[in-house]
Image: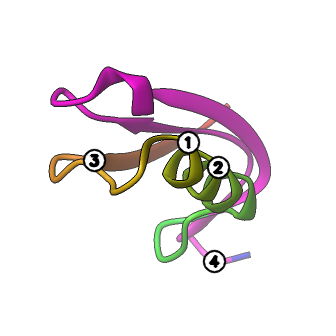
Amino acid sequence: MSIFSLKKSTWWIRSKQDPRWNCDGRTDVFSVYNIPEEAEIKIKELQNKYGEMPDDLVFGGMKD
């Protein structure tokens, strides 16, 4: 495992412009280079529900 991937992590998505996009979740593998599949799925769900992503949407994560 590289220093750039962590197991059992929490991810989050945040927007100050549109707080409806604020959410979080868990993943078994987190990489600083890729958004976890669970977060990508959530983003697609939110796009279907609310339309275009807010300009200030940010993604983060940390090891649990």
Viewer-nearest of discs 4 and 1: 1
Label whose residue precedes the other's in the sequence (3 or 1): 1
Q: Quadrant of the C terminus?
A: top right
Image coordinates of residue 62 in percent, x first then y, are 53, 40
Badge 2 vs badge 4, beta-carbon distance below 8 Å: no
The magenta segment = 2-30
Viewer-nearest of discs 3 and 4: 3
Residue 13, above or below 53: above
Question: Label 4 amino acid?
Answer: Ser
Residue 44, above or below 62: below
Residue 55 appears left or right of 24: left
Residue 16 appears left or right of 50: left
Badge 1 vs badge 2, beta-carbon distance below 8 Å: yes
Q: Quadrant of the N terminus?
A: bottom right
**Residue at the spot x=63%, y=52% of the render?**
39
- State yes or no: residue 11 in magenta: yes
Badge 3 vs badge 4, beta-carbon distance below 8 Å: no
Viewer-nearest of discs 2 and 4: 2
Residue 26, above or below 59: above
- Which residue bears the numbered disc 4? 2
Residue 21 numbered tag: none
Q: Secondary structure at mark 2?
A: helix
Residue 57 numbered tag: 3
Label whose residue precedes the other's in the sequence (3 or 4): 4
